[in-house]
Image (spheres, rainbow, N blue to C red):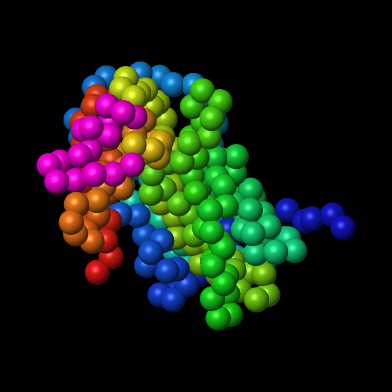
Amino acid sequence: MQRSPRLFIAAVLSATAVSPSLAAAPVTIGSAGAVAPSELGVTAVGSRGASEGALALVQATSPKVHALWRPGQPGPSVISGLQEATVGDTPTARALDFVASHQALFGVAPTALRVSAVRPLRERTVVVLQQLQTIDGVAVDVWHRTMAITIDQRGRVIAVSNDTSPAGSVARATIGLDAAHALALQPGEGGSKDGTRVVVVGGAGAFEAAVFQVAKLGTFDAVEVVINLHDGTVSSRQSAVRR
């Protein structure tokens, strides 16, 4: 069966549609040096203007459509006002179909996203997509950059929460994981040297980083520490314990 062209893009956001755990944690960016170009996969396919233009197509058929943008984000962080049919046999397939059909709206290519979680709720399913950045032929997660798509039992997209944003040029690593691990530790702390390699995107630009889970010795407390692998600074240090 041949698919007919889509002329609208929309989703409905409800307070129960997206789990609070999907929200990105705040990032404090350390001072970064000059940003050197990296070997990148195609991540950005649009801009804020292109996204607004794509949304304008929706308004002709769905006057209640509404979107919210965060500064510097090409695609909206929230879209509300309509329900959209998708194609696929599973919620995951339908979520990917939705993203592939709406590149101009979100400004991030489908090839820069992977499915990281599928969360069934009462009468809907949330599919979480993790943003990726390709460095030296390896796909690396972009830290705390996700898109959560909520799909109802009829296969319609009813909610979208979006934190994705193109990384652009990424400042490359100049220190290794051992050196980064030493920077992450404070007196009375310990942790594995196997840090998770990520790309961090923030106000100071994008850079390669390593994330460590650091334990406070003699306690049940833990700290998540992000080390900027480009300039050797602590980018973020925050509690990893949910209270």
Classify residue 77 as left or right of residue 105: left
* Between 221 and 163, the one nearer to me in the picture: 221
Classify residue 198 as left or right of residue 127: left
Rendering coords of residue 240 (x, y %): 27, 56
Residue at the image position 48 percent from the left and 36 percent from the top = 140
Circle count? 0
Rendering coords of residue 241 (x, y %): 27, 61
Classify residue 1 as left or right of residue 122: right
Instruction: Look at the image and tell me in which quarter the C terminus lies.
Output: bottom left
Rendering coords of residue 227 (x, y %): 27, 35
- On whether residue 189 falls in the magenta region, the answer is yes
Instruction: Look at the image and tell me in which quarter the N terminus lies.
Output: bottom right
Q: Residue 22, located in which quarter of the rendered image?
A: bottom left
Residue at the image position 70 percent from the left and 64 percent from the top = 90
Please tell me whether residue 181 is drawn above or below residue 35 in the rendered image.
below
Q: Which residues are magenta?
A: 177-192
Rendering coords of residue 190 (x, y %): 24, 44
Q: Residue 21, located in which quarter of the rendered image?
A: bottom left
Can residue 36 be seen from the camera position used here? Answer: yes
* Between 184 and 139, the one nearer to me in the picture: 184
- On whether residue 138 falls in the magenta region, the answer is no
* Between 209 and 48, the one nearer to me in the picture: 209
Residue at the image position 19 percent from the left and 52 percent from the top = 216
* Between 62 and 215, the one nearer to me in the picture: 215
